[in-house]
Image (tube, rainbow, N blue to C red):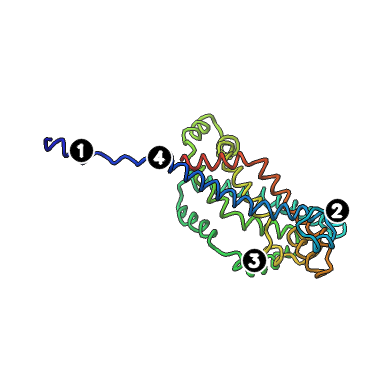
Amino acid sequence: MSADTRVATTAAPARPERRGPSGERTVAVTSHTVLGIWSLLVLLPFAWTVVSSFKTNREIFASPFSLPSEWRYQNYVDAWNTAGIGSYFFNSVVVVFSALVLTMVMGAMSAYVLARFDFRGRTVLRYLIVAGLTFPVFLAVVPLFFILQQVGVLNTLPGLILSYATYAYPFTVFFLLSFFEELPGEIAEAASIDGASEWRTFFQVMLPMAGPGMAAVAILNFVGLWNQFLLPVVLNSDRSNYVLTQGLAAFASQAGYDVNFGALFAGAVMTVVPVLVVYLVFQRRLQGAVSAGGLK
């Protein structure tokens, strides 16, 4: 063997070792086992909660893992009317959807400007917004409390909407930055040549192209805001403005062990169902956005 041949053989890149059939089978069995255990950990408590929401207190304590002798739909009526879940649900819908619209509009506009315009202080602004992700919420509630008090919107739904929007804003900008950076600049230039203003280029050309990212961050924000508990507890002490998580906690603690646990579980189910519906309806958009982000 010549010296050139030996050098060529040495310099050849190492090919990745391919797993044999037994290795692939081991990976498949392990991954399916982990996913199966994880699914059981999620589904079994939820199924138990749903079944318990149709029981009486006696059935819940006497036979917690059996089916109800009679499916008690009255628990849902009691939770909706007596426990006030209906008004809490309405407040949650108003607060979460208003905050979501505000966050998506402001976050998308901020991300678009930071991604596609070059101006002094842009890098500092990006770092400040990203730093907002690392700031713990419990450290912000005290200054937020006094700010809302000074503005005059403490214990009101508008104050809660502004707090929710502020809470979700850094994540929204951070998530959308990469989507706007990857959009081709030639399209914006073509729109400008055709006479479109910057506003029209953003709302009618660039924003629709970032649709998968917008849908994904909207779903994630909806789940986070719907389950928010700390902000309403600290910033909203008016019982008529309670949101679902806050009202459910008050219902559980107001009567101690005399609480109607069937109605309590019914309220918990009604709290979870909107999140499940949103995820099931929009899960393909979320998976598509994650896949698109991984291919960039």
Crowdedness near tag 2: few (<14), some (14–19) or many (≥20) residues, C-alpha within 10 Å = few
Report which residue position mark 2 lands on: 69
Q: Between marks 4 and 3, how big is the CA–CA gap?
A: 58 Å
Task: Inspect the image, locate mark 1, and give the three-letter code of the amino acid beneath it.
Answer: Thr
- In the drawing, does residue 186 fall left or right of residue 103? left
Q: Which is more N-terminal, label 2 or label 1?
A: 1
Tag in front: 4 or 1: 4
- In the drawing, does residue 262 fall left or right of residue 205? right
- Residue at left offset 45%, top offset 54%: 123
Tell which of 250 and 180 is nearer to you: 250
Q: Which is more N-terminal, label 3 or label 1?
A: 1
Please state the horizontal and vertical placement of residue 157, each as a whole percent of the image: 75, 58
Report which residue position mark 1 lands on: 9
Q: Between marks 4 and 2, how big is the CA–CA gap?
A: 53 Å
Q: Between marks 1 and 3, how big is the CA–CA gap?
A: 66 Å
Task: Inspect the image, locate mark 4, and give the three-letter code of the amino acid beneath it.
Answer: Gly
Q: Between marks 4 and 1, how big is the CA–CA gap?
A: 25 Å
> Please, is residue 131 above or below residue 173 in the view?
below
Please state the horizontal and vertical placement of residue 174, each as a whole percent of the image: 53, 51
Tag in front: 2 or 3: 2
- Tell me, for residue 144, which label it has, or none: 3
Tell which of 240 and 216 is nearer to you: 216
Tag in front: 1 or 2: 2
Q: Quadrant of the N terminus?
A: top left
